[in-house]
Image (cartoon, rainbow, N blue to C red):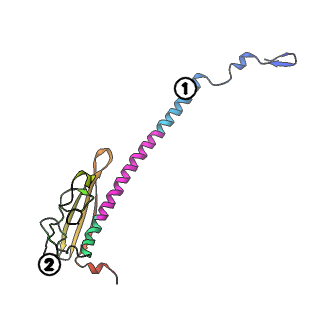
């Protein structure tokens, strides 16, 4: 209640004490803000994990595509004959310019250097820690389907979620006639 004093009104002190926030209101507001901040932190963590996994998958796809294209290029440039494009123990070096041992059919570390033969994915690729892509392993399987057709399958193992290894596989088919792939 206001009472007049010298033409001015004085505010009752009880009404003044009810203005502002109580301690309980402040605690509830802080709890709501804390839940929001924890949610944002969880979303950021999830985004970082998803980004890392996406990067590994993209790198894997590029490595597989690169290897499949290399095999086709070896045939097109006649660096290797169609008979030489095979796994170790199945290579036909008849009429070849170089003696080639073949591609190993087991999982090997992915090397960033091709080794003395100049071909990636072979037994002579360096395996020292500075010359490989860490935690990436590649297997190249070449299956003859007929005398003029081979299936080239590249499988890549790489780190996935929760430290488990994941696999990606790419398949291509290679024929015996490099000229039939080009238009004139």
Q: Which mark is residue 27?
A: 1
> Which label is found at residue 173?
none
Q: Few, some or many C-alpha atoms within 10 Å of disc 1 (few <14, some 14-19, many ≥20)?
A: few
- In the rendered image, residue 58, in percent from the top left (x then y), is placed at 36, 57
Residue at 28% x, 47% y is 164
Q: In the displayed structure, would residue 178 be above or below residue 5?
A: below
Where residue 10 appears, x then y in whole percent?
A: 80, 17
Q: Which residues are magenta?
A: 40-66
The tag on residue 95 is 2
Question: Regarding mark 2 in the picture, which secondary structure is present there?
Answer: loop
**Image quadrant for the N terminus?**
top right
Is residue 136 in sight in this rendering? no
Q: What residue is drawn where x is 52% and y is 30%?
A: 31
Farthest residue to the bottom: give it. 184
Q: Name the chief secondary structure element in magenta.
A: helix
Q: In the rendering, at what x and y percent does residue 80 appear?
A: 20, 73
């Amino acid at each position: 209640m206001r009472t007049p004093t010298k033409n001015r009104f004085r505010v009752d002190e009880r009404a003044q004490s009810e203005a502002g926030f109580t301690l309980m209101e402040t605690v509830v507001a802080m709890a709501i803000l804390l839940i929001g901040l924890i949610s944002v932190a969880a979303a950021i963590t999830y985004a970082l994990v998803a980004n890392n996994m996406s990067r590994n998958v993209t790198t894997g796809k590029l490595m597989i595509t690169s290897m499949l294209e290399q095999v086709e290029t070896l045939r097109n440039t006649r660096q290797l004959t169609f008979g030489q494009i095979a796994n170790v123990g199945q290579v036909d070096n008849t009429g070849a310019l170089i003696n080639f041992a073949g591609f190993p059919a087991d999982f090997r570390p992915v090397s960033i250097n091709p080794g003395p033969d100049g071909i990636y994915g072979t037994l002579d690729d360096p395996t020292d820690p500075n010359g490989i892509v860490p935690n990436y392993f590649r297997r190249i399987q070449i299956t003859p389907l007929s005398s003029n057709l081979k299936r080239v399958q590249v499988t890549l193992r790489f780190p996935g979620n929760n430290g488990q290894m994941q696999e990606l596989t790419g398949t291509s088919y290679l024929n015996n006639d490099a000229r039939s792939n080009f238009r004139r």
